[in-house]
Image: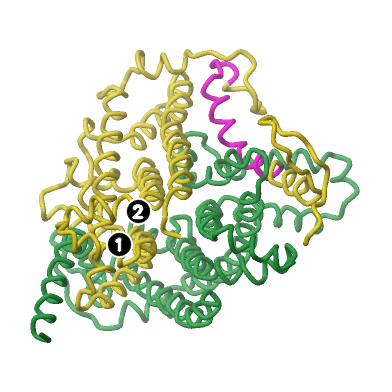
Chain colours: A yellow, B green
Amino acid sequence: MSVEKGLRIRLRDGKIGRVTFGKTIGFLLLAAVAAFMALPLVYVVTTALKPLNELFYFPPRFFVEQPTLKNFQDLFLALDGLDVPFTRSVFNSVFVTVVVVVLVIIITCMAAYGLVKHKVPFGNLIFSLILMGMMFSPYVIQIPNYLIVNGFGMVDSYWALIIPKIAVAYNLFLVRQFVQQIPDPFLEAARIDGAGEMSIFFKIVMPSLKPVIATLAVFSFVNNWNDYFTPLIFIQDEALKTLPLAMQMISSGNSIARAGAASAATFIMVLPTVLIYVLMQKHVVDSMAYSGIK
Amino acid sequence: MKKRQSGLQKRKALVGYGFIAPWIIGFGVFCLFPVVYSLIFSFSEIKDPTTFSFKMVGLQNYLDAFLVDTEFLPTFLQSIGDTFINLILILFFSFFIAIIINRKIRFRGFFRMVFFLPVILGTGFILDQILGENLQEQSITVVRDLLFSEDVVRTMPAEFLEMIQELLNRITVVLWNSGVQILLFLTGLQGISPNIYEAARVDAAGEWEQFWLITLPLMSPMILLTIVYTLVAGFTNSSNEVLEYILEIAFQKNQLELSSAMGWVYFVFIIVFVGLTFVLMRKPIERASDR
């Protein structure tokens, strides 16, 4: 029997916890690194709240002295010189990203399920193609990609931002690992009970993939929300431009008033990604705890 | 009986293809096809940039990449070395952090969130645009101001300070690229049943033994996944120097054929390298995790 070490303390919920030396060191270390990593985010928040004169302090200050919401007001109401209101870009980004995330989740899980649980001929060949696709940087094939998207007549439409982004090799690789962990007897039992393929997929496979779906949702949301390159190449129509492009336009405007609007726009750009992560992260933990897979 | 079995299997395979089809079509059209397209470009010379009509020139572009272009090979080697050093540092760092977070430490939810932040903030591409200055550099500046007061700078030799600066840069790169890896390791750690540790404790195994005999073997498939992920992420990262150079050749110097050839050299290297890693490590790892 091992002897329990450390100081006994009473936690807030009344349980007895133990503070060991190792745990304390670990905690302090985490806290130091975490503080270092949270700096940029804190900076984004404080900058968004800075009044104009504080934005131009030299050397720049980290914290805000007289916080104000005027930057947001400028961004949504008084932004002159932009043909399209900022809210339209927000809508474009939200619409495109949400559609992509939903399609990515359904189509990737379907493919992983078909690939792993149906023992399709050439399954290994398909898998090696996926592995190879992961290693070919999307940046290198931008021009051929443009030729193809153009060939479909999708340039300057939402389609150009949605369709090419659904089948991502890395996503399938990730989900495949988790589909492998679903026990075959589960699926066989459902089949014997007369469940159709579709209901097996939606009622058994998808729920048991919850943790990885949450992960997938976070990944593809962030990637598409922050994607600057794709809309830059495929979208010329001002009304269809997404947030990253709109932000670039705001910050490249040379009027001083724009600086405030730009800092508020940065905040708005970062907020949803942080929010979705905070929401999904709880979901990841929960579903990990409940899943009967392992 | 046997025939009926195979008919059933055929049906099953067909259903399987049905599930895979939407993904495969998307992948084929928007990934595989452009890749083949760029392979053709790499062996050809574009006659007319408006219609992209071309003529085959054999290996000319590949020879140019290595013999005529003096910058390609050094950039290439430099970037490989960098990725490799980062891989090792990222693996150790993220495994370490994941283990600390996985213990019942206070505010673990908060920590888990913070370490994933860099992934959420993106590669800094967007934020760079706005803040006009690299976020990573800003974090470094804050720390440097804390560490290097004027007195320190006056008393220390310049080489030493440069070394520390270099180290700080490296640490920042590692911190900012470990988010996914920490998450992967945490997912793996939480998948290990507490019963196993319970049983080990009953058998009087200490923490250290538990780590080497339970955690590490059971985590080894996840470690392989993380190695592959880190390599691929490092090699295909948009801030990778080789890729930046290849893009520069394509978009600023308008030599699409040469940049396609370079892209393919790089791609084949990555495939061989990551493929070898995967093949060489899979067997020992399967053995370790089966124990």
For the residue pair A161 and B256, the one nearer the viewer reads as A161
Q: Residue at x 29, y 48 (%)?
A: A230
Q: Earlier in the sequence, mark 2 or mark 1?
A: 1
Q: Position of residue B260 (x, y in %)?
A: 31, 69
For residue A262, which quarter of the picture? top left
How far from the left and from the top, in percent, is residue A42? 59, 31
Please tell me whether mark 2 sits on a helix, a strand or a loop.
Answer: helix
> In which quadrant of the rendered image does the C terminus of chain B lie?
bottom right
On whether residue B179 falls in the magenta region, the answer is no
User: Measuring 41% from the left and 33% from the top, which residue is drawn there?
Assistant: A272
Decide which of B232, B148 is in the foreground and name it: B232
Q: Nearer the viewer, mark 2 or mark 1?
A: 1
Q: Give the side of residue B45 with respect to residue B277, left or right.
A: left
Specify whether A213 is left or right of B209: left
Q: Chain of mark 1?
A: A
**Magenta region's main secondary structure?**
helix
Q: Nearer the viewer, residue B59 or A43?
A: A43
View extreme (bottom): residue: B2
Q: Secondary structure at mark 1?
A: helix
Question: Does the image show residue B177?
Answer: no
- Distance between mark 2 and mark 1 Cα atoms: 11 Å
Number of labels in the image equals: 2
Please give the label number shown on residue A186: 1
In the rendered image, the quadrant that contains the N terminus of chain B is: bottom left
Does residue A29 appear in this view?
Answer: yes
Q: Is residue A49 magenta?
A: yes
Q: Give the magenta-colored segment's residue range.
A: A32-54
Q: Is residue A40 above or below residue B212?
A: above
Label 2, on which residue?
A208
Which residue is found at the position 20% from the left and 65% from the top? B28
